[in-house]
């Protein structure tokens, strides 16, 4: 099922990429006659009135050809873009910025396709280091988790009963009970949070009889049910999310992985300000505008995504983790250096120190992106 979903995501990504990709420069044969859409006389491969292509296929094979054409071919641009993206990324970036749009796949189209392709490969065969898949739990593991939870819950209830007995003793002796009341309230809140986290974890991982057997959040907590929203000075949703993640860490990991490709576009606005800072101190570099930096970042992320795709495909062929690790460590700095030199016409020294700074900034951007994913995973 994951493999089928991955293929579907790759096709979706290709179609999205094709939707944003300009069609200029495509090679289409001239068809004589009139346009089948508006009836205007054709003067070339496309109608000059409505823009529809003159030649229209009407066979089943042509339908699948159009699908593959839209997903993979990009009208021949992809075969001009990929070699330059791999070895001359700076020249590709600069030429696209300066107006050569018909020759190359646009940054956003390539970004969409590469991200969705990466997800498809990860779903089908795993990443370069065989990343986690969806959480799965056997019936035995679920039963063991339930037994552990019941034992911990019984101990918590016993401790809560002890606190209640102590409160009754102090009240009978006329002693102050404010401090022990706070301890009882805290223990009851913690117990309720654990109940809710366990219930949601069982529902998400293994819906069915096991989920139905999970204790409801409103279950008796020693006679002191606590409404989370009524606790002064506490962040109920954060406490609940944290305990839910702690109860089922594999689910959190799965959410991080699935959200990573859904929100991968956020890496672009996160990264652009850091790149802009590298060219702020010199007046001569201020001619580079935000658009230049967006194109640079988008092509760079697409290149890194396609690099992970290649490494993922090499892993099943027997390429060891040492080689893959070295490639992950060495290739990005070299690629960024070459892209900086070509895109911004920098000297070797200028490109070197900016490469080092950009690698640090990339780590910061990755941390911000991870925190975003972690927040989405906790709240999801």
Image (tube, grey):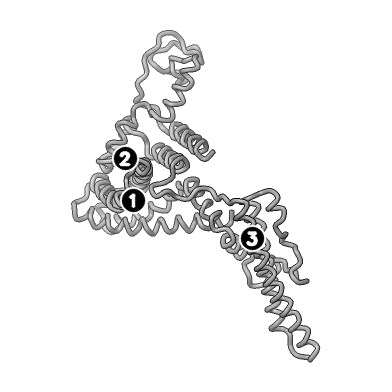
Among all residues in the image, which is located at the extreme front?
Answer: 140
Residue 197 has which mark?
Answer: 3
CA gap between label 3 and label 2 equals 51 Å
Q: Where is the N terminus found, in terms of image quarters?
A: top right
Asked if the residues shown at circle 3 and circle 2 are in contact, with their CB atoms under 8 angstroms apart, the answer is no
Tell me the distance, in whole angstroms, between the alpha carbons under discs 1 and 3. 37 Å
Mark 3 crowd level (few <14, some 14–19, many ≥20, 10 Å Cα): many
Q: Which label number is shown at residue 369?
A: none
Of residues 211 and 361, the one nearer the viewer is 211
Counting from the top left corner in percent of width and height, residue 224 is at 75, 71
Tell me which label, 1 or 2, sits earlier in the chain.
2
Taking the image as shown, residue 270 lies to the left or right of residue 336, namely right
Contact, mark 1 vs mark 3 (Cβ under 8 Å) = no
Disc assigned to residue 321: 1
- Mark 2 closeness class: few <14, some 14–19, many ≥20 residues within 10 Å: some
Which callout, 1 or 2, points to the residue nearer the camera? 1
Rendering quarter of residue 156: bottom right
The residue sitting at 57% across, 60% down in the picture is 245
Marks 1 and 3: which is nearer the front?
Answer: 1
What residue is shown at x 46% (from left), y 36% (from top)?
10
Q: Do labels 1 and 2 touch, CB within 8 Å?
A: no
Q: Secondary structure at mark 2?
A: helix
Q: Earlier in the sequence, mark 1 or mark 3?
A: 3
């Amino acid at each position: 099922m994951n493999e089928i979903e991955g293929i579907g995501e790759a096709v979706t990504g290709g179609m999205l990429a094709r939707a944003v990709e300009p069609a200029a420069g495509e090679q289409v044969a001239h068809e004589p006659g009139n346009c089948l859409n508006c009836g205007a006389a054709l003067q070339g491969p496309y109608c000059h009135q409505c823009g529809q292509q003159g030649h229209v296929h009407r066979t089943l094979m042509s339908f699948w050809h159009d699908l593959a054409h839209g997903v993979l071919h990009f009208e021949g641009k992809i075969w001009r873009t990929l070699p330059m993206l791999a070895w001359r990324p700076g020249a590709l970036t600069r030429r696209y910025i300066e107006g050569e749009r018909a020759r190359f796949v646009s940054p956003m189209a390539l970004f969409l396709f590469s991200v969705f392709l990466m997800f498809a490969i990860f779903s089908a065969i795993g990443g370069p280091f065989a990343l986690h898949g969806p959480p799965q739990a056997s019936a035995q593991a679920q039963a063991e988790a339930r037994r552990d939870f019941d034992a911990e819950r019984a101990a918590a209830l016993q401790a809560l009963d002890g606190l209640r007995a102590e409160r009754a003793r102090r009240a009978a002796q006329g002693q102050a009970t404010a401090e022990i009341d706070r301890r009882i309230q805290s223990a009851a809140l913690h117990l309720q949070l654990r109940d809710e986290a366990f219930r949601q974890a069982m529902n998400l991982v293994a819906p069915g009889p096991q989920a139905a057997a999970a204790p409801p959040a409103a279950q008796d907590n020693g006679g002191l049910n606590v409404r989370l929203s009524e606790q002064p000075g506490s962040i109920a949703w954060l406490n609940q999310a944290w305990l839910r993640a702690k109860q089922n860490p594999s689910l959190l990991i799965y959410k991080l992985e699935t959200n990573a490709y859904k929100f991968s576009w956020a890496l672009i606005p996160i990264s652009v300000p850091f790149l802009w800072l590298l060219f702020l101190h010199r007046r001569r570099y201020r001619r580079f505008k935000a658009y230049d930096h967006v194109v640079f970042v988008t092509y760079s992320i697409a290149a890194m995504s396609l690099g992970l795709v290649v490494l993922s495909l090499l892993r099943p062929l027997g390429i060891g983790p040492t080689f893959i690790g070295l490639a992950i460590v060495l290739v990005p700095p070299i690629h960024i250096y070459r892209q900086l030199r070509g895109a911004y016409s920098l000297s070797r020294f200028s490109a070197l120190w900016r490469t080092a700074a950009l690698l640090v900034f990339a780590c910061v951007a990755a941390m911000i992106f991870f925190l975003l994913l972690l927040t989405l995973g906790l709240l999801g």
